[in-house]
């Protein structure tokens, strides 16, 4: 799979990922919840007055979908993080306020986020500008 190259491709993936939350398909909704709970690096964006969190390992690949994501044996967050950092013009950073908002987003969909990433790495965020 190729990486996103433009903000438009990223925005399409952000919208696509958000649609899974509202999907009537239980598989898509579960995919959303699992990615939200397991993610470590997130693009944070605002839609309809709400902060939303999309994992870099999903939104960093062009035209991604649950099926494509699960079949992608070569997906790597380090690669998507580099692509997103270049595209967004900043590096992801830990942010205590966004961390609290992330926990609220998880609670709204009844998921328990993992405490940290591998080797106790804290979650990091890019905030959409």
Image: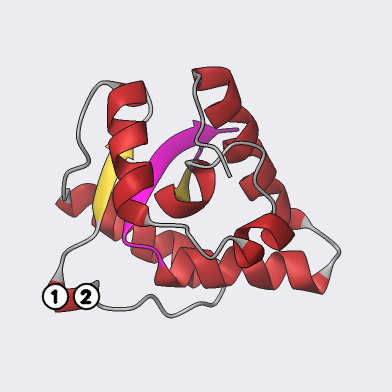
For image coordinates 74% across by 64% down, the residue present is 28
- Identify residue for label 1: 120
For image coordinates 31% across by 43% down, the residue present is 81
Q: Distance between the residues labelled 1 and 2?
A: 5 Å
Q: Which region is colored magenta?
A: 39-51
For image coordinates 64% across by 46% down, the residue present is 64
Q: Along the line of sight, which residue is nearer the eye, 74 or 8?
A: 74
Q: Is 48 situated above or below 57?
A: above
- Relative image position of residue 6 (x, y in whole percent): 50, 19
For image coordinates 52% across by 51% down, the residue present is 58
- Relative image position of residue 37 (x, y in whole percent): 45, 71
Residue 51 appears in the picture as rendered: yes
Q: In this view, does 120 lie to the left or right of 57?
A: left
Q: In this view, does 19 lie to the left or right of 108?
A: right
- Identify residue for label 2: 118
Q: What element carries label 1?
A: helix
Residue 127 appears in the picture as rendered: no
Q: Is mark 2 on a helix, strand or loop?
A: helix
Q: Residue 71 carries which label?
A: none
- Relative image position of residue 113 (x, y in whole percent): 38, 75
Q: Along the line of sight, which residue is nearer the eye, 38 or 70?
A: 70
């Amino acid at each position: 799979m190729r990486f996103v190259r433009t903000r438009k491709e990223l925005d399409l993936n952000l919208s696509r990922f958000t649609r899974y939350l509202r999907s009537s398909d239980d598989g898509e909704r579960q995919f959303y919840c699992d990615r939200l709970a397991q993610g470590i690096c997130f693009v944070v964006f605002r839609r309809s007055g709400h902060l939303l969190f999309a994992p870099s390992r999903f939104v960093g690949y062009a035209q991604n979908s649950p099926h494509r994501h699960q079949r992608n044996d070569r997906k790597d967050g380090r690669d998507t993080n580099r692509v997103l950092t270049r595209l967004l013009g900043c590096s992801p950073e830990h942010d205590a306020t966004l961390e609290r908002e992330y926990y609220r987003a998880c609670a709204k969909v009844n998921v328990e986020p993992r405490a940290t990433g591998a080797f106790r790495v804290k979650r990091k965020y890019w905030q959409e500008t």
